[in-house]
Amino acid sequence: QVQLVESGGGLVQTGGSLRLSCAASGNIFASYGAGWYRQAPGKQRELVAAITTSGEETRYTDSVKGRFTISRDNAKNTVYLHMNNLKAADTAVYYCSIENPRSGVAYWGQGTQVTVSS
């Protein structure tokens, strides 16, 4: 069973930065696309950023473009989300997910809380 362990969440002031990490167990990571999602209280889970297996292509939801950067290190089985210029609206539980682009099989992390105080 693949496990994803997120870390790096916490409390930060408006305008601050955080880096989330998500480490995957096993040896499948390099063949899976990866993404970061978030869910704020009372809202649906949304895709924040995604990255292809090779890391060559990324995409972002409009609200984080220019502030967040997704990256991956396949040698370390880890995907990152660098978050800069954080806003109160970024407050949410952040989840990482990996998905096989052919089979659609996906795995999820347990989530990490990000709280941005004004």
Image (cartoon, helix red, strand yellow):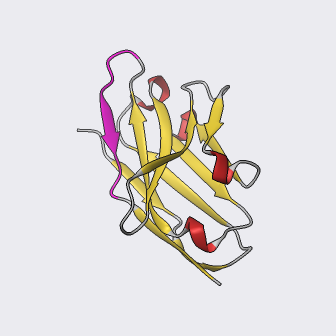
| The quadrant where residue 87 appears | bottom right
**Image position, residue 88 (x, y; %):** 60, 74
60 left or right of 79?
right
| Residue ranking furthest to the front | 42
Give the camera-side residue of 28 and 14.
Answer: 14
In the rendered image of this protein, does residue 19 appear above or below residue 27? Answer: below
| The quadrant where residue 12 appears | bottom right
Q: Residue at x 53, y 65 (%)?
A: 8
| The quadrant where residue 72 appears | top right
Q: Residue at x 46, y 23 (%)?
A: 31
Indicate yes or no whether the magenta region holds residue 104. Answer: yes
**Image position, residue 28 (x, y; %):** 39, 28
| Residue ranking furthest to the top | 102
76 left or right of 100?
right
**Image position, residue 68 (x, y; %):** 68, 52
Give the main secondary structure, helix, strand or loop, of the magenta stretch.
loop
Indicate yes or no whether the magenta region holds residue 62. Answer: no
**Image position, residue 99 (x, y; %):** 39, 30
Residue span colored magenta: 102-110
